[in-house]
Amino acid sequence: MLTIDQATYDAIVRHAKRDHPDEACGIVAGPEGSDRPERVVEMVNAAGSPTFYEFDSTELLELYKQMWDRDEEPVVIYHSHTATEAYPSRTDIGLASEPGAHYVLVSTREHGNNEGPVEFRSYRIVDGEVTEEEVVVVPALPGA
């Protein structure tokens, strides 16, 4: 189960809507071993594509250095799908390299960057196996 606070949920959805029609991507860091998504880091989609996302390798390395310095880890790795449902593609599954992370997908296919709901789903992806998990949005995370 992914427990996420409303502000973090809203930030991810805003990013997905803002970057539509291209896919948005980012990471939500949290304290090592806590499973608490606390710090949203919007990343640049180096692919600049409506059907694919790719983290910029230099930007990603810098983020990992920051997280190591702050005793953080990637709790959520997110991206958007602009024309399809919020379910990992074969490419997404192949790129999933953080077995402890929640992989969040936001589909903006229905309303694009306009007002309206999005499809927001979370998965665990380990060794190519995809398992959907419940998402619980809370006003604030306990202990944060």
Image (cartoon, rainbow, N blue to C red):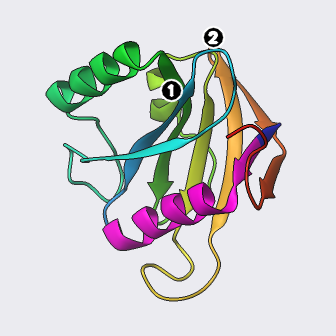
Image marks 1 and 2: residues in contact by CB distance under 8 Å: no
Residue at 19 percent across and 43 percent down: it is 46
What x and y, as percent, mark residue 118? Answer: 62, 71
Residue at 49 percent across and 21 percent down: it is 72
What x and y, as percent, mark residue 79? Answer: 46, 48
Residue found at the very far bottom of the displayed protein: 115
Residue at the disc numbered 1: 74
In space, the residues marked 1 and 2 are separated at their CA atoms by 18 Å
Nearest the camera: 94 or 33?
33
Predominant SS along the magenta part: helix
Residue at 61 percent across and 25 percent down: it is 101
Q: Which mark is residue 41?
A: none
Q: Quick one: quadrant of the N terminus?
A: top right
**Is residue 50 at all visible to an observer of this figure?**
yes
Residue found at the very far left of the displayed protein: 58
What x and y, as percent, mark residue 120? Answer: 66, 59
> What's the residue type where badge 1 is placed?
Pro
Residue at 19 percent across and 25 percent down: it is 57
What x and y, as percent, mark residue 112? Answer: 45, 79
Residue at the disc numbered 2: 127
Q: Quick one: quadrant of the C terminus?
A: top right
Inspect the magenta stretch and tell me whether residue 6 lies in it. Answer: yes
* Residue 84 position by quadrant: bottom right
User: From the viewer's perspective, is 89 left or right of 139?
Assistant: left
**Is residue 85 at all visible to an observer of this figure?**
no
* Start-end of magenta stretch: 3-19
Quick one: SS at disc 2? loop
